[in-house]
Image: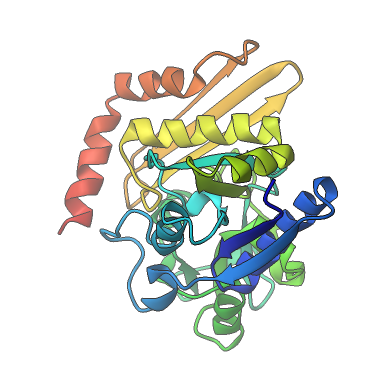
Amino acid sequence: MKNKFIVGTRTSKLALFQTNKVIFELKKNFKNFHFEIKEIKTKGDILLNQTLDRNLDKGFFVNEIQKLLIEQKIDIAVHSLKDLPVENDDGLKISAILKRGNPQDVFLSKSKKKLDSFSKEQVIGTTSLRRKAQLLKINPNLTIKDVRGNVDTRIKKMLNGEFDGLVMAAAGIERLNLNNHITEYFNHDIFLNAPGQGAIAVEHSVNNHKAEEIVKKINDSNSMLCVNHERNFMKAMGGGCNYPIGAYSYLQGENLNLEGIVLSLDGKQYIREHVSTKNFNNDLSKELAEKFFKKNVVQIINKIDSEINK
């Protein structure tokens, strides 16, 4: 078997941390293998002035990396799963999801205030329509503005006074040991995460059988099961990763659960539902989607589309 593998990744501190974590897990199983990191700039890393809540290309943060996979110029790629489009590329395969990190969203505040202490005078930064909509659902008077950049860049912008608070993914903050900036964790009962948030995905070409053989050794089957339900639900809703759609799947005792939410951009309209099963072969995403369609989620999705396409 080939014993040298090139691992593609984005260039941020978080991406490199996650890539080294994957390599660490691989080396536990393949001590004599060599893994070489190739840093790749994606469109999302270059176009830092583009707002993320408009019509972005699918794969805004991963296209360049996936192209190298297909061309087999790299063997495997490490991604934050929530950056990957839910529409599968027939030439690519995700064979491993590492044990999932914290899927929650967190609130960061320059003054260490919690969200309920914020008024319209304080500015909250976020890159996500899902986060904006859920913030406005909690308090329609909040002032929310777009913020771009990597995790540490956004925090610097807050500390420099451009923003009074930020909403970000807990996993990224925790992986970079920046927990001291967290003011509060948002519980799932009031704030649902993005599908796949907190999960690290390892992808390869379907033609690279050696890569698949080594990658599948580090897959966490429970994490894979849960994130697939979340992503399939988002796919059923017809929205991309920049839509105000949240989903969280989790194991609780003998039950597998899936919760979902779809919100209007202003947070005033929303549908939230939950399904559960003891049979892990059941398609929870389909069952949950049917509940949403019965409640006319299409009306909310169409309204989102019309406002995004303005």
Q: Quadrant of residue 24?
A: bottom right
**Image x and y of residue 143, in percent:** 42, 69
The quadrant in which the N terminus is found is: top right
Asked if residue 197 shows in the view, the reply is no
Q: Residue furthest top?
A: 279
Residue situated in front as seen by the camera: 117 or 305: 305
Would you say 179 lies left or right of 188 here? right
Q: For the point 32% across and 45% down, which residue is it?
A: 264
Query: Where 160 falls versus 151 (above or below)?
Result: below
Asked if residue 93 shows in the view, the reply is yes
Q: For the point 44% across and 36% down, which residue is it?
A: 261
**Image x and y of residue 135, in percent:** 47, 55
Residue situated in front as seen by the camera: 31 or 188: 31
Q: Residue furthest front?
A: 1
Query: Where 145 falls versus 225 (above or below)?
Result: below
Would you say 304 lies left or right of 220 here? left
**Image x and y of residue 120, in percent:** 44, 70
Query: Where 289 falls versus 57 (above or below)?
Result: above
* Color style of the picture: rainbow
Query: Where 40 falls versus 211 (above or below)?
Result: below
Would you say 169 lies left or right of 53 here? right
**Image x and y of residue 180, in percent:** 76, 71
The quadrant in which the C terminus is found is: bottom left
